[in-house]
Image (cartoon, rainbow, N blue to C red):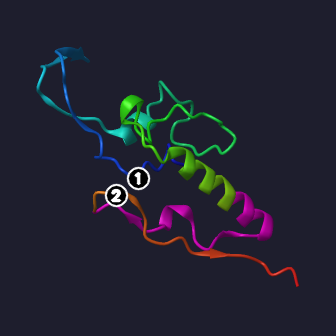
Amino acid sequence: MLRVYTIAEFANSRVAVEDVQIGGVTIRAGDPVLALSNAANHDPSAFDEAEEIKLDRGARNHVAFGFGIHQCLGQNLARMELQIVFDTLFRRIPTLRLAKPADRLPYKDDAFIYGIHEVPVTWEDPA
Protein backbone atom coordinates (compact mmCIF):
# COMPACT_ATOMS: atom_id res chain seq x y z
CA MET A 1 0.00 0.00 0.00
CA LEU A 2 2.82 2.40 0.80
CA ARG A 3 4.31 1.85 -2.63
CA VAL A 4 1.05 2.55 -4.49
CA TYR A 5 -0.13 5.38 -2.22
CA THR A 6 3.10 7.21 -1.45
CA ILE A 7 1.94 10.00 0.86
CA ALA A 8 4.81 12.50 0.67
CA GLU A 9 5.35 13.05 -3.03
CA PHE A 10 7.37 16.27 -2.90
CA ALA A 11 9.44 15.58 0.22
CA ASN A 12 12.47 14.47 -1.78
CA SER A 13 13.98 17.76 -2.95
CA ARG A 14 17.75 17.55 -3.29
CA VAL A 15 20.72 19.33 -4.85
CA ALA A 16 22.99 17.50 -7.30
CA VAL A 17 26.50 17.17 -5.84
CA GLU A 18 28.11 16.35 -9.19
CA ASP A 19 27.24 16.48 -12.86
CA VAL A 20 25.16 13.51 -13.95
CA GLN A 21 23.33 12.57 -17.12
CA ILE A 22 19.90 10.95 -16.86
CA GLY A 23 17.81 10.11 -19.91
CA GLY A 24 19.95 12.27 -22.14
CA VAL A 25 19.62 15.32 -19.88
CA THR A 26 22.59 16.73 -17.99
CA ILE A 27 21.98 17.76 -14.39
CA ARG A 28 24.81 20.00 -13.21
CA ALA A 29 26.33 20.05 -9.73
CA GLY A 30 24.34 22.56 -7.69
CA ASP A 31 21.13 22.12 -9.71
CA PRO A 32 17.97 21.50 -7.69
CA VAL A 33 16.42 18.06 -8.20
CA LEU A 34 12.90 17.01 -7.27
CA ALA A 35 12.70 13.22 -7.06
CA LEU A 36 9.11 12.06 -7.44
CA SER A 37 8.68 9.02 -5.19
CA ASN A 38 5.24 8.24 -6.52
CA ALA A 39 6.55 8.06 -10.09
CA ALA A 40 9.42 5.80 -9.01
CA ASN A 41 7.05 3.57 -7.04
CA HIS A 42 4.85 3.11 -10.13
CA ASP A 43 7.70 2.32 -12.54
CA PRO A 44 6.66 -0.76 -14.55
CA SER A 45 10.32 -1.63 -15.18
CA ALA A 46 10.78 -2.02 -11.41
CA PHE A 47 7.39 -3.51 -10.41
CA ASP A 48 5.29 -6.08 -12.27
CA GLU A 49 1.72 -4.77 -12.53
CA ALA A 50 2.88 -1.58 -10.85
CA GLU A 51 -0.62 -0.11 -10.49
CA GLU A 52 -1.92 -3.11 -8.56
CA ILE A 53 -1.93 -3.49 -4.78
CA LYS A 54 -0.79 -7.02 -4.03
CA LEU A 55 -0.55 -7.51 -0.30
CA ASP A 56 1.39 -10.74 -0.79
CA ARG A 57 3.96 -9.11 -3.11
CA GLY A 58 6.48 -8.81 -0.29
CA ALA A 59 8.55 -6.25 -2.17
CA ARG A 60 10.20 -3.66 0.06
CA ASN A 61 12.26 -2.03 -2.64
CA HIS A 62 9.95 0.96 -3.03
CA VAL A 63 10.98 4.47 -2.02
CA ALA A 64 7.91 5.54 -0.02
CA PHE A 65 10.24 6.08 2.96
CA GLY A 66 13.05 7.65 0.96
CA PHE A 67 16.33 5.92 0.20
CA GLY A 68 19.87 5.62 1.53
CA ILE A 69 20.94 8.27 4.03
CA HIS A 70 17.62 10.05 3.44
CA GLN A 71 15.50 7.10 4.58
CA CYS A 72 12.80 7.81 7.15
CA LEU A 73 13.89 6.81 10.64
CA GLY A 74 10.30 5.84 11.50
CA GLN A 75 9.82 3.41 8.62
CA ASN A 76 10.10 0.25 10.72
CA LEU A 77 7.65 1.61 13.28
CA ALA A 78 5.20 2.59 10.52
CA ARG A 79 5.43 -0.87 8.93
CA MET A 80 4.91 -2.55 12.29
CA GLU A 81 1.90 -0.32 13.09
CA LEU A 82 0.28 -1.06 9.73
CA GLN A 83 0.85 -4.80 10.05
CA ILE A 84 -0.61 -4.86 13.58
CA VAL A 85 -3.62 -2.70 12.74
CA PHE A 86 -4.57 -4.64 9.60
CA ASP A 87 -3.99 -8.08 11.16
CA THR A 88 -6.03 -7.12 14.22
CA LEU A 89 -8.77 -5.34 12.30
CA PHE A 90 -9.43 -8.17 9.84
CA ARG A 91 -9.18 -10.83 12.53
CA ARG A 92 -11.71 -9.04 14.76
CA ILE A 93 -14.04 -7.92 11.93
CA PRO A 94 -13.58 -10.47 9.12
CA THR A 95 -16.59 -9.14 7.14
CA LEU A 96 -15.18 -5.59 6.98
CA ARG A 97 -15.32 -4.07 3.50
CA LEU A 98 -15.47 -0.70 1.78
CA ALA A 99 -18.92 0.93 1.89
CA LYS A 100 -18.41 2.38 -1.58
CA PRO A 101 -16.17 1.52 -4.54
CA ALA A 102 -12.47 2.33 -4.07
CA ASP A 103 -12.50 4.56 -7.15
CA ARG A 104 -15.08 6.79 -5.43
CA LEU A 105 -13.02 7.44 -2.28
CA PRO A 106 -12.24 11.15 -1.81
CA TYR A 107 -8.51 11.58 -2.27
CA LYS A 108 -6.60 14.48 -0.74
CA ASP A 109 -4.44 15.72 -3.58
CA ASP A 110 -4.56 19.43 -2.85
CA ALA A 111 -1.82 19.57 -0.22
CA PHE A 112 1.80 18.65 0.45
CA ILE A 113 0.81 15.29 1.95
CA TYR A 114 -1.29 12.94 -0.18
CA GLY A 115 -3.95 10.67 1.28
CA ILE A 116 -7.62 9.83 1.58
CA HIS A 117 -10.07 12.16 3.33
CA GLU A 118 -12.24 9.29 4.55
CA VAL A 119 -12.62 5.55 4.13
CA PRO A 120 -16.25 4.56 4.79
CA VAL A 121 -16.57 0.91 5.74
CA THR A 122 -19.32 -1.53 6.56
CA TRP A 123 -19.51 -5.05 7.95
CA GLU A 124 -22.02 -7.74 8.75
CA ASP A 125 -22.77 -8.41 12.40
CA PRO A 126 -22.47 -12.17 12.96
CA ALA A 127 -25.01 -12.06 15.82
> Magenta residues?
86-110
The location of residue 70, given as percent across then percent down, is 36, 35
Q: Is residue 5 left or right of residue 27?
A: right
- Report if residue 69 is visible in the image: yes
Q: As rendered, which of 27 and 30 lies closer to the eye?
A: 30
Distance (Cα) linking label 1 and label 2? 6 Å
In the picture of the structure, the residue carrying the numbered disc 2 is 113
Question: 57 above or below 27?
Answer: below
The location of residue 74, given as percent across then percent down, is 48, 48
**Residue 26, disc:** none
Q: Are marks 1 and 2 in contact (CB under 8 Å)?
A: yes
Quarter of the rendering containing residue 58 = top right
Q: Residue at x 25, y 18 (%)?
A: 22
Quarter of the rendering containing residue 113 = bottom left
The location of residue 5, given as percent across then percent down, is 47, 50
Query: How many neighbours does mark 2 have within 10 angstroms: few (below 14), some (14-19), or many (20 or more)?
Result: few
Secondary structure at badge 2 equals loop
Secondary structure at badge 1 equals loop
- Tell which circle, 1 or 2, labels the residue nearer the N-terminal end: 1
Q: Is residue 125 left or right of residue 116?
A: right
Query: How many neighbours does mark 1 have within 10 angstroms: few (below 14), some (14-19), or many (20 or more)?
Result: many
Residue 71: say if magenta.
Answer: no
